[in-house]
Amino acid sequence: MNNPLLATFRQAYRDLDLFPLLSDDEVESFRVDYGQDALVRLEQAVDDAPKDGKIIFAGHRGCGKSTLLAQFGRLMSDPEREPRYFVVRFSISDMVEMSAVDHVNILYAIALQLLSKASESEVDIPSTTQEEILNWFITTHSTTETKDLKSQIGIGGDVLKVLTAKLQTESTFREEIKRTYERRISELVAKIEEIADLIQHHAIRPLLVIIDDLDKLDWKLVEEIYKNNILALFQPKMRMVFTIPIAVVRDIELRTILQSACGRPILQMGVAKFFTKADRHLQQQPDQRKVDIFLKVLERRFGEHWSEVMSPQTARQIVLLSGGVLREMVRIARECFSQCSLLLRLEPERTEMKIDAQVLDLAVQELRNEFSLSLGKRRSEILVKTYKEAKPEEVDDEDFALLLHGLYILEYRNNQVWYDVHPIVKKHLQLEQLLPTMDYGSAEDAHH
């Protein structure tokens, strides 16, 4: 369909998909300063940490952690900085299928990433040493798997790319890695430290490893990795930053284990508080400075088409409906673009289209219905209780933790920690007549 207006909405939809911002070009095109307090706290934590210090970084999914960690990696490796670190940053989701992550393949992924970064940075590792290390990594418990690896590499395959691809896509290889190293963790850690020492000797810089997206793991995997295998995961003697889901901070046992293992409090990146705890149910003015930051994110993503595709009032509503979570704002905006594209396909003769209250209403309906699929009587009761009291009835309630993990409930911090229900989830509860219809951000309410 050759429709310039449709092309505009499709391009804006794609631009919004660039999240998190990782490459220099993406940062240059779309970045808005956000989360500076968390950035400074991370910087201080790493600089103050011992050579084998571990930093735990928590936050809601989609609050901007990945973009901030990418910025943090660039900051810590800046040639003008003192000390300047040799930074190895990667997402575990790029290395292992998320449903299959365990402590063994996390450590194996660290080793592969160190080797890859050393090669990319032209670290001068003696060829005999490099060959010995690589041979060690392709020698598995199974002689058949070892022969298969050697044959793939022998016909021109890049050993690191072959190993990374197999770790990412082949469950049999992951099982083989687990069988090989599960009872030889100390040997795997020794190899990681050997590579780290070679890097630091050549670069004459301290090493910093940043592992992103561990916070996106299934809740049961989080418990298995962080509760049962934390000592193995923290064994490599180097500075490392790990991410965890926000719900872990609520779990007394897990939080205690993590804080004991790393010897410091968990750092947290909060979401933007548009309203105070006291004003959260009232139709009063939000924190305009924070709203403007979110509006700027939208504006930079739309670029020259900003005024053409969205009214200022609707943009503001999208921001408020996000609850202060950047990715939620992006998700709502993308759904608006999707609705516009659908309308243009259904009515190709249209020459004008703008994201207005009606389009936002359609988008919110889609997202509201998606949220509602996982809500039954008990979870709805927890949400209503949280809405009214801004805290859970029981701190160790598993359903509360799952709702927090899934962004149904959002955590806010100032001089105290408090909670509120995601604005779109509130709309579902209002339609179910479980909550009064008096909250802000009511794009739908105007039509009912």
Image (cartoon, rainbow, N blue to C red):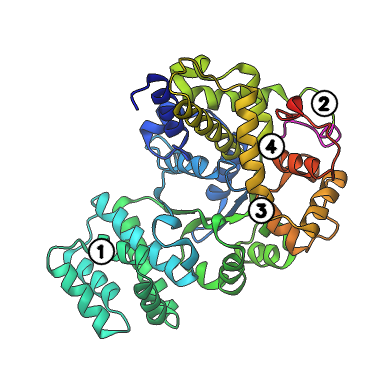
Q: Quadrant of residue 424?
A: top right
Could you tell whether 51 is left or right of 408 in the image?
A: left
Q: Which mark is residue 323?
A: 4
Per the rendered image, the range of residues in magenta is 272-281
Label 4 environment density (alpha carbons within 10 Å; few <14, some 14–19, many ≥20): many
Q: Position of residue 224 (x, y in %)?
A: 58, 71
Q: Is residue 276 magenta?
A: yes
**Amino acid on which disc 1 is placed:** Val
Secondary structure at numbered mark 2:
loop
Amino acid type for the residue under numbered disc 3: Leu
Cα distance between the residues tagged 2 and 1 = 57 Å
Residue 442 against residue 411 in the figure, above or below: above
* Disc nearer the start of the sequence (1/4): 1
On the image, the x and y values in percent for residue 334 come to 52, 34
Q: Which is nearer the N-term, disc 4 or disc 2?
A: 2
Quadrant showing the N terminus: top left
Question: Viewed as shown, does residue 427 lie left or right of 303?
Answer: right
Nearest to the eye among marks 4 and 3: give it: 3
Nearer mark to the viewer, of 2 and 1: 2
**What number is the disc on residue 162?**
1
Q: Residue at x 64, y 25 (%)?
A: 358
Q: Residues within 10 Å of mark 1 (few under 14, many from 20)?
A: some
Q: CA distance from mark 1 to mark 4?
A: 42 Å
For the residue pair 386 and 197, the one nearer the viewer reads as 386
Looking at the rendered image, the disc whose residue lies closer to the viewer, 2 or 3, is: 3
Q: Which residue is mark 2?
A: 283
Query: Going from the N terminus, do you reach mark 2 or mark 1 first?
Result: 1
